[in-house]
Image (tube, rainbow, N blue to C red):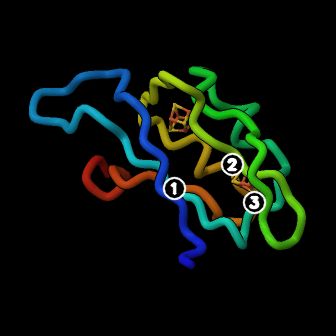
């Protein structure tokens, strides 16, 4: 099984031509469940869920109906490069 999870959130800021959803990728093996990504997200898009990785860390997930501003803060704060956005390259 892939160690990558793809989590989709509604895009908060609608730019012309931009996709309506943001894809957040999570490398399950790298995540240590530190919650930094959850805490920094001003939109409350992320929460720690009940899925655990092989090391016993609970993984973040997109909350039901979660809206993402594609700000990239969760990926910037993650000490383990475990979470990132599909749109980061497009919007750089
Ligand atoms: S990109 Fe920004 S809004 Fe989206 S989940 Fe990460 S911190 Fe929250
Ligand atoms: S900041 Fe990174 S390591 Fe910490 S819970 Fe979020 S994805 Fe996992």
Secondary structure beneath dot 1 equals strand
Q: Residues within 10 Å of mark 1 (few under 14, many from 20)?
A: many
Indicate the quadrant where residue 18 lies: top left
Secondary structure beneath dot 3 equals loop
Callouts 1 and 2 close, C-beta under 8 Å = no
Does mark 1 have its CB less than 8 Å from ligand 1? no
Of labels 1 and 2, the one closer to you: 1
Q: Residues within 10 Å of mark 2 (few under 14, many from 20)?
A: some
Q: How much space separates mark 1 and mark 3, taking CA atoms? A: 12 Å
Write down the residue under mark 1: 84
Q: How much space separates mark 1 and mark 2, taking CA atoms? A: 10 Å
Residue 56 lies left or right of residue 76; in this view the side is right
Secondary structure beneath dot 2 equals helix
Does mark 2 have its CB less than 8 Å from ligand 2? yes
Of labels 1 and 3, the one closer to you: 1
Write down the residue under mark 2: 77
Callouts 2 and 3 close, C-beta under 8 Å = yes
Q: Nearer the viewer, residue 79 or 43?
A: 43
Q: Nearer the viewer, residue 42 or 26?
A: 26
Q: Write the residue at 74% across / 41% down.
A: 49
Does mark 3 have its CB less than 8 Å from ligand 2? yes
Which of marks 3 and 1 precedes in the sequence?
Answer: 3
Indicate the quadrant where residue 5 lies: bottom right
Write down the residue under mark 3: 79
Which of marks 2 and 1 precedes in the sequence?
Answer: 2
Q: Write the residue at 51% across / 56% down.
A: 84
């Amino acid at each position: 099984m892939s160690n990558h999870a793809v989590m989709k959130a509604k895009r908060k800021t609608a730019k012309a031509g931009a996709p309506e959803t943001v894809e957040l990728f999570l490398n399950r093996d790298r995540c240590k469940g530190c919650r930094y990504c959850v805490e920094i997200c001003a939109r409350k898009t992320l929460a720690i869920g009940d899925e655990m990785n092989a090391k016993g860390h609970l993984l973040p997930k997109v909350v039901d109906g979660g809206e993402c501003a594609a700000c990239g803060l969760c990926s910037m704060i993650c000490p383990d490069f475990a979470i990132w956005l599909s749109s980061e390259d497009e919007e750089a």
